[in-house]
């Protein structure tokens, strides 16, 4: 997305939003789970956009106290084992208001790992429990740079906490990331929707 400098340097002189540079967000695909082992996006992730955004809407797990995860593929979804280095931290607060913490999650990061990356751990499976959030993937078709990602999710957890989880990292490859898979580490995705958007100029 290009930046535009307004020579008068005054927001008050801008008469419409059309005068501002804006990153257009285009819906590429939407998938809804129904007892699904995984949700895969094997088309639509290419060189069309410099940034891709996944939105997670009320992802509900069948199994209690599980982890929502993802991995990327460089071969159209035949294999999901791309090398990842990542970092994870979260804040939490109980419904009773008795426990508030912020901390690094050493068991959820990876250091040149090839497993699925956890982006939220501890979601519950009661009827009113789910997780929502988003994940950004930057320039997945670059043949020069590694592929960075950022995720932020929130959930009402299995133990009646609100969790806000931040995950960042990169796929350590200069090959195209052309497919992404999401899954729960134990059991299926009972319900919920994942939307894929492309963000460009």
Image (cartoon, rainbow, N blue to C red):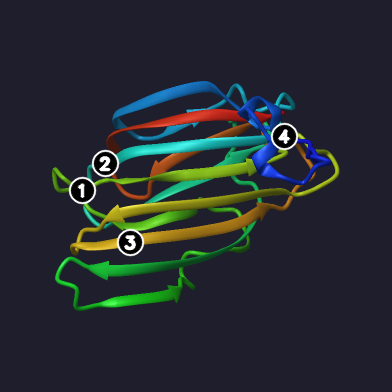
Residue 114: % across, % down: 60, 53
Mark 2, other Cα within 10 Å: few <14 / some 14–19 / many ≥20:
many
Spatial CA distance of label 1 from label 4 is 34 Å
Look at mark 1 in the image and give the residue it sits on. Answer: 129
Spatial CA distance of label 1 from label 2 is 7 Å
User: Residue at the spot x=48%, y=60% of the render?
Assistant: 166
Residue 154: % across, % down: 36, 53
Is residue 57 visible in the rendered image? The answer is: yes
- For numbered disc 1, what is the local secondary structure? loop
Viewer-proximal residue, 173 or 129?
129
Look at mark 3 in the image and give the residue it sits on. Answer: 163
Is residue 76 visible in the rendered image? The answer is: no
Q: Earlier in the sequence, mark 4 or mark 2?
A: 4
Q: Seen in the image, is 159 located left or right of residue 189? A: left
Query: Compared with residue 111, is residue 18 higher up or lower down, i.e. above or below?
Result: above
Look at mark 2 in the image and give the residue it sits on. Answer: 60
């Amino acid at each position: 997305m290009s930046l535009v400098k307004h020579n008068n340097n005054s927001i008050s002189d801008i008469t419409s939003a059309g005068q501002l540079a804006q990153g257009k967000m285009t819906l590429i695909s939407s998938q809804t789970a129904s007892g699904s082992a995984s949700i895969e996006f094997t088309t639509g992730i290419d060189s069309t956009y410099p940034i891709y955004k996944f939105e997670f809407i009320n992802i509900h797990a069948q199994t209690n106290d599980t982890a929502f995860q993802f991995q990327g593929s460089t071969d159209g979804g035949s294999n999901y084992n791309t090398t990842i280095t990542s970092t994870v931290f979260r804040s939490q607060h109980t419904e009773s208001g008795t426990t508030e913490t912020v901390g690094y999650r050493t068991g959820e990061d990876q250091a040149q790992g090839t497993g699925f990356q956890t982006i939220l751990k501890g979601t519950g499976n009661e009827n009113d429990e789910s997780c929502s959030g988003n994940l950004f993937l930057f320039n997945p078709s670059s043949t020069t740079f590694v592929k960075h990602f950022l995720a932020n999710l929130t959930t009402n957890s299995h133990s009646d906490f609100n969790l806000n989880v931040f995950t960042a990292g990169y796929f350590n490859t200069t090959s195209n990331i052309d497919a992404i898979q999401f899954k729960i580490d134990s059991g299926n995705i009972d319900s919920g929707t994942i939307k894929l958007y492309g963000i460009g100029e």
